[in-house]
Structures are given as C-alpha cells and as structure tokens.
C-alpha cells in the first residue's frame, strides 16, 4: 500500500512540474488578445509622422507592436518582391504600389505581381514637391524658373532623388517641363543624387548643393527654406497610396492600423508637417 501511495504522489508531483515548466504557449495580453507584431514598410518621408503616430496607437491597440522599415518606395517595393516580411506598405508614389498590384494596368505592373490585398488599397495622403535651398541661399535661387535658368547656364549643383525614388521621378518631370536634359546636366556636374528624399534633404542642409527638390514635409522636418512649390502641371499630384499585403499573416490587424491612419487623430499629425488628406 505504501508503494502505491508513493507512486501516486510522484505522478501528481510530475504533473504539477510539467504544468509549471513545460513548453510555453504564446503569452496573451491583459485583455485576452494575443500580441501581434506588424511590420510596416513606409516611404522615408513618413518617418517622423509614423513614429509619432505609433506612440499614439499604443493606446488604441495595446496588443499591437509596430515595426517600421523606412526607405525609398522603390527599395521597399524590391524588398517586398524579394520576399521580405511586410504587413502594410505605404508608398510615396502610385508607380511602386501599382507594380505590386494585380489590378493595376499591365503597362505598369509589367511583371504581373500580386501582393496587394484586394479592397485594402487607399490613397491616404497628398504631399507637395518643393524647391529647397541651404541657409543663406548663396545662389539666390527663388523659384523653379530661376532653377531652370541656372541649370541651363550650368552654374549650380542640384540635388535630386534617384530615378527609382518617387521624389526623383517627380523631379524628372519638372526637368522635362523646362526642356532640360537630365543626363547632360548630370554629365556636366550640375546634378547629384540621393537614394531617398532624406539624403537629398541632408545635402541641402549641409550646404553641399545649391538647391534640392524635396517634399514639403521633409523641408519642414529638416528646417529648410522653401522657395517654390511645383504645380500639378509640372509634375502631377503627389499621392501616397497604402495597402495591406495579401502575404501578411496579420491582415485584420494591418487593416485596423491602416484605418486608424485615416482618423482625425492621425491625420492631425500628418497635417502638422504639411501632408493633407486626398480630396
């Protein structure tokens, strides 16, 4: 009888230990919801605003952790295409989103890529393309017209984004608007490039160039002087589309955050640096 009681006691003790020290299951948040980590790929020009909005979102969704990857939209598009984990993509240009969207025109989505979750894509924000100058504006550039004249004369250095960067593509349209040959200007040493809009803004801030074409929001963030704003006739509207990716394992949570970005609370942050909702 003693041996039986000992065996029963040992079995009970083993069961208790297994319950305490066995394989852990995923921890749950205080409200019972499982914590989720969302990976958000966003254009570099959204760095400051999304970082602030992420802090505010902790109150709205305490179980969600936001992890950001900020870079040029072209670089982000390539990373997504190459299999990077991404739940939500915010682009600074329609082209990069179209290249991932199966419903986009085949002339843009030339590879037939299908990464955008149907029904999730929205035009979230509008920005402005501006001409910024360093402190003191040494060359006295006060407009895009003046910029074009100086470039034609070959007596200034302009910073612009690479051709795979939306701000660079908008700049190319501006150069075309003025009948300027980008390749010839670059070869003559009148143009220098940045891999994203932040790099262009830095060149202007450091005074290593005479002017730079950047977004109004980046000029605001960097404390730069804006001397002119491009018209839609010069480069079109600057629309930021956003979409949940169909490869996301957290589509509901990603959609919830995307919906939050359109709320008055989040939009106030965007508008505070120069963005505006798309009319």
Image (cartoon, grey):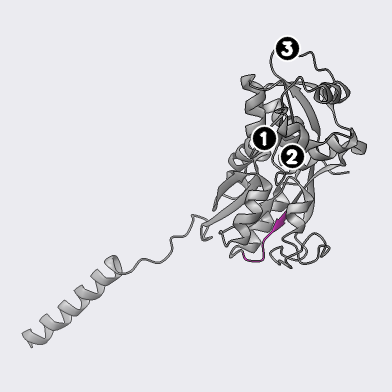
The quarter of the displayed image where residue 86 is located: bottom right
In the image, is residue 250 above or below residue 200? below
- Residue topped by disc 3: 138
Label placed on residue 193: 1
Disc 1, SS: strand
What residue is rendered at 63% in x and 49% in y? 75
Q: Position of residue 182 (x, y in %)?
A: 78, 36
Residue at mark 3 to residue at mark 2: CA–CA distance: 24 Å
Residue 243 is a magenta residue: yes
Q: Position of residue 247 (x, y in %)?
A: 62, 66
Residue at mark 2 to residue at mark 1: CA–CA distance: 8 Å
Label placed on residue 170: none
The residue lying toward the viewer, choosing from 222 and 79, is 79
Disc 2, SS: helix
Q: Position of residue 208 (x, y in %)?
A: 63, 21
Q: Position of residue 91 (x, y in %)?
A: 71, 48
- Residue topped by disc 2: 168
Image quarter (top left, top right, bottom left or bottom right) of the C terminus: top right
Residue 226 is a magenta residue: no
Among all residues in the image, which is located at the extreme right? 233
In the image, is residue 89 above or below residue 197? below
Which one is earlier in the sequence, the residue at label 2 or at label 1?
A: 2
Instruction: Select label 2 or label 1 by which is in front.
Output: 1
Which one is earlier in the sequence, the residue at label 3 or at label 2?
A: 3
What residue is rendered at 74% in x and 21% in y? 156
The answer to whether one can see residue 157 in this image is yes
Image quarter (top left, top right, bottom left or bottom right) of the N terminus: bottom left
Q: Are marks 2 and 1 in contact (CB under 8 Å)?
A: yes
The magenta-colored residue range is: 242-247
What residue is rendered at 57% in x and 53% in y? 39
- Crowding around mark 2 (Cα neighbors within 10 Å: few <14, some 14 to 19, many 20+) is many
Residue at mark 3 to residue at mark 1: CA–CA distance: 20 Å
């Amino acid at each position: 009888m003693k041996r039986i009681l000992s065996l029963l006691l040992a079995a009970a003790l083993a069961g208790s230990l297994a319950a305490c020290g066995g394989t852990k299951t995923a921890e749950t948040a205080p409200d019972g919801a499982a914590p989720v980590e969302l990976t958000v790929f966003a254009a570099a020009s959204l760095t400051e605003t999304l970082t602030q909005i992420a802090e505010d979102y902790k109150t709205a969704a305490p179980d969600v952790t936001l992890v950001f990857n900020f870079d040029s939209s072209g670089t982000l598009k390539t990373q997504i295409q190459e299999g990077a984990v991404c739940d939500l993509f915010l682009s600074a240009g329609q082209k990069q989103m179209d290249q991932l969207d199966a419903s986009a025109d085949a002339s843009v989505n030339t590879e037939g890529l299908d990464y955008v979750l149907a029904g999730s894509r929205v035009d979230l924000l509008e920005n402005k393309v501006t001409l910024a100058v360093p402190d003191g504006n040494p060359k006295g550039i006060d407009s895009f017209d003046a910029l074009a004249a100086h470039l034609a004369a070959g007596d200034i250095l302009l910073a612009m984004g690479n051709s795979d960067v939306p701000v660079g593509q908008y700049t190319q349209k501006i150069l075309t608007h003025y009948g300027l040959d980008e390749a010839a200007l670059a070869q003559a040493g009148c143009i220098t490039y940045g891999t994203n809009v932040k790099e262009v803004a830095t060149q202007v801030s450091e005074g290593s160039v005479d002017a730079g074409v950047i977004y109004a929001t980046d000029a605001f963030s960097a404390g730069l002087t804006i001397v002119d704003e491009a018209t839609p006739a010069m480069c079109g509207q600057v629309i930021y589309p956003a979409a949940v990716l169909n490869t996301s394992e957290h589509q509901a949570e990603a959609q919830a955050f995307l919906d939050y970005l359109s709320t008055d609370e989040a939009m106030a942050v965007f508008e505070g640096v120069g963005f505006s909702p798309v009319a």
